[in-house]
């Protein structure tokens, strides 16, 4: 049986862990249109997001890139519209999920291309070694072939490993940002007086 002090410490520990796990990002908007591009007249579910809005979310994410996110959109009470809210939240989730998938596909393609480079480089070096070992070519032809195959083979191996392992930092960062934002919880909070009818 726990005494009151132990129970209080346990509650404080649970609250601290919850705060460590969840990071709230608050963004103030004046209208729902602040979330979307001014140049896109389509319906909410299809509209492009505003670059300023995306950049602000990315900037806030980079300040503390750990854990799960709650994105709180703070708006005037006068614009409250529950139906529009649902559509906006759906659009935000879909947008960031699509961006995450696109970036992930780019990274996967880079790794596959890197693998092809490595295999190509190894084939060139292996064929040069085998040609020399079995004496299928005379010495001059072997040396001339080596001048071409040797640098190409090593270039393929090193360039391939570079593509497979050293994914560009920004690309990897953006992928992680979009992944977290696609899993974030989006909520609206309204301040001020209600719209007068």
Image (cartoon, rainbow, N blue to C red):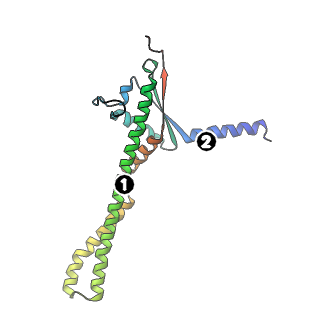
Q: Is residue 20 left or right of residue 194?
A: right
Q: Quadrant of residue 35?
A: top left
Can I make out residue 168 in this image? Answer: no
Q: Are marks 2 and 1 in contact (CB under 8 Å)?
A: no
Residue 189 against residue 176 in the figure, above or below: above
Q: Secondary structure at mark 1?
A: helix
Q: Secondary structure at mark 2?
A: helix
Residue 120 visible to the viewer: yes
What is the distance, in whole Å, between disc 2 and disc 1 at their CAs?
33 Å
Q: Is residue 98 left or right of residue 38?
A: right
Residue 137 in the image, given as x and y percentages of width and height: 22, 86
Name the residue carrying label 2.
17
Q: Nearer the viewer, mark 2 or mark 1?
A: 1
Q: Tell me residue 67's x, y (percent).
A: 52, 43
* Residue 72 percent location from the top left of the image: 48, 31
Q: Which residue is mark 1?
A: 107
Q: Nearer the viewer, residue 42 or 171?
A: 42
């Amino acid at each position: 049986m726990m005494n009151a002090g132990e129970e209080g410490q346990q509650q404080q520990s649970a609250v601290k862990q919850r705060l460590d796990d969840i990071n709230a990002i608050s963004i103030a908007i004046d209208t729902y249109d602040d979330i979307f591009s001014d140049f896109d007249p389509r319906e909410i579910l299809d509209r492009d997001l505003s670059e300023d809005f995306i950049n602000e979310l990315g900037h806030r994410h980079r300040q503390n890139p750990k854990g799960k996110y709650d994105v709180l959109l703070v708006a005037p009470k006068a614009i409250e519209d529950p139906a529009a809210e649902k559509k906006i939240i759906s659009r935000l989730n879909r947008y960031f999920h699509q961006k995450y998938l696109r970036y992930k596909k780019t990274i996967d393609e880079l790794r596959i291309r890197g693998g092809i480079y490595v295999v190509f480089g190894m084939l060139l070096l292996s064929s040069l070694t085998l040609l020399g070992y079995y004496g299928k070519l005379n010495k001059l032809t072997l040396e001339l072939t080596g001048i071409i195959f040797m640098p190409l083979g090593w270039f393929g191996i090193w360039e391939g490993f570079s593509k497979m392992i050293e994914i560009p930092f920004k690309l990897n960062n953006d992928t992680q940002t979009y992944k977290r934002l696609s899993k974030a919880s989006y909520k609206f909070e309204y301040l001020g007086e209600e719209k007068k009818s």
